[in-house]
Amino acid sequence: MIWDKSIECASREQMREIQSQRLTKMLERVYTTVPFYRNKLKENGIEPGDIKSIDQLSYLPFTLKTDLRDNYPFGLFTVPQSDIVRLHASSGTSGKPTVVGYTRNDIDMWSEVVARSLTMAGITQNDMIQVAYGYGLFTGGLGLHYGAEKIGASVIPVSGGNTQKQLQLMVDFGSTVIACTPSYAAFLGERILKEKISPKDIKLKVGVFGAEPWTEEMRNQLQSLLGIKAYDIYGLSEIIGPGVSMECEHQCGNHIYEDHFIPEIIDPNTLEILPYGELGELVFTPVSKEAMPLLRYRTRDLTRLHSEQCDCGRTLVRMEKCLGRSDDMLIIRGVNVFPSQVESVLLELAETSPHYQLIVSRENNLDSLEIKVEIDEQFWSDEVKVLEALRARIKNNISSVLGISASIRLVEPSSIERSEGKAKRVIDNRK
Amino acid sequence: MIIKQLSVFLEDKSGRLTDLTKILAENDINITALSIADAADYGIIRMVVGRPELAVAVLKANGFSVNLTDVACFIIPNEPGGLYHALKILAENHINIDYMYAFATETTASVIIRSASIQEVIDVLQKNKLELLRASQIYQI
């Protein structure tokens, strides 16, 4: 099912036309209303009329997360406060939060892209969507909520956490869709097994998971655990929130809504634009955003773009599942390590669960990596030699995937703290 | 003749074994035999207790990772050569022992044994006239 064929299946020429028009108008607006951008554009010798098509996108300056912090809270808004109908903020790990604002049109556009996304996952007005993303300053809950209402589905705004209630509503209301972070979905699946809820009491058929990077192995696990088809929804609050891109039934990358968010891939070191198919940092220019459009926002997410038309009929450019955010990337003994790589190793082994934690320390000026792994209750043996063989197997697979060795610590099931939102995968004691 | 042994995976954290025994005590569950297999950063506690099903339920409810393992318990005289005689029979029948632990009471000793083929162990020992303890007997020791 396709929500808006005229856009999602538009020819490349039509799409470029839309993008170019919107880019020109957006530049005009930021130049006249945002001193930060006016100065930046002037420094680059650019007047609004100079840019007429998206071919000239590369002349524009980049925007960094630190630019949002430096202009905290409302310095990048293009409209007066009276036009702002909503504010969201993401908790910065250090210092001030990143604030984003929305006009009424922005909320409509956001609902539209989430409606496209849910439709892409086959969700209709006949579905019952349990929105278990947090509602509040985080964009996940309300973002999904408005899109789900737009397609006419029945929305259960349960928000994150309160697992007992989640399971009760899931069974009693007969939720057909669950939307949450993949790590919380894994936790829900675990609780369903533990509480011995019969699979026939669970009516779920689709999961809409996002807000943290996850792997194909995690997808397989969630699909079999919950008896669903698991879809990846991608987004970030700086651009709009969830609904920047979404997977279709072919699960071959997320379709980016390019009419609103123009994607580029750059080399994060040289800042050169990379061709389709090459791995680099994802950059977005949200051209139709009113309250806070950004020029070439560097997401720090590493991925590839693909332009071949998808079997679903959509012509939108696709992005691969993110390997991880470059901020999540750890450099251990000079080697780049993503928590998602550890996840894929653990999920390939039946005896371990997707609950793990990386602990990085420095002893005698040498980095060390310890990985805490919960053993799966159904598989653990009471023989030390069996557990030690498992530990050796994990250690081997980790070192062949990561390229560095790690010490593996087997821990009791459910002993790693569960998160109701984004999982805390890394403890870096080097800082 | 199969005895349900409790196997508990414990992380190497101080107080963990105390927590475990406290829960058993509070639920009036007696420990008849106990052995600990320790690895670098975790241990496996193996215990024969009265009311093993209840023990599993209360330990699980308290967040412990616990399973039941099938073991057997045979009786030997508490004298030199007692264990040798029994193990020789098992070796002659090509039975591989995963682990065992024992405790002596006056004239006899009880040996708890785990093997992948536990029923075979029981059959061989019975055929050779060794006394085996029933679950109901050992839980009451």
Image: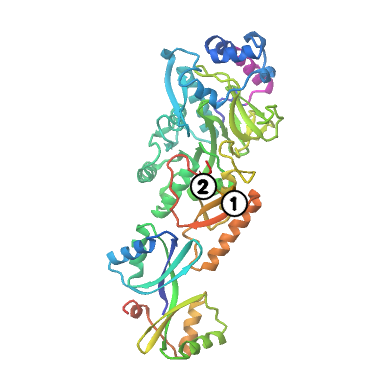
Which of the chains bears the disc numbered 1? A
Residue carrying label 1: A345
Residue name at image x 59 percent, y 32 percent: A300
- Residue wearing tag 2: A222
Q: Main secondary structure of the magenta part?
A: helix
Identity, as a three-letter code, of the amino acid under mark 1: Val
Residue B93 on the magenta span: no
Crowding at mark 2 (Cα within 10 Å: few <14, some 14-19, many 20+): many
The residue located at (60%, 46%) in the rendering is A341
Taking the spot 58% from the left edge, 19% from the top edge, the residue there is A287
Q: What range is drawn magenta here? A: A9-24
Disc 1 on helix, strand or loop?
Answer: helix
**Quarter-of-image position of residue A420:** top left
Mark 1 or mark 2, whichever is nearer to me: 1
Q: Secondary structure at mark 2?
A: helix
Left or right, A335 with reference to A206: right
Residues beneath discs 1 and 2 located on the same chain: yes
Mark 2: amino acid:
Leu
Q: From where the camera sits, is residue A112 visible?
A: yes
Residue B113 in view in this figure = no
Judging depth in this view, the residue of A70 and A15 nearest the camera is A70
Determine the residue located farthest toward the right in the rendered image. Answer: A275
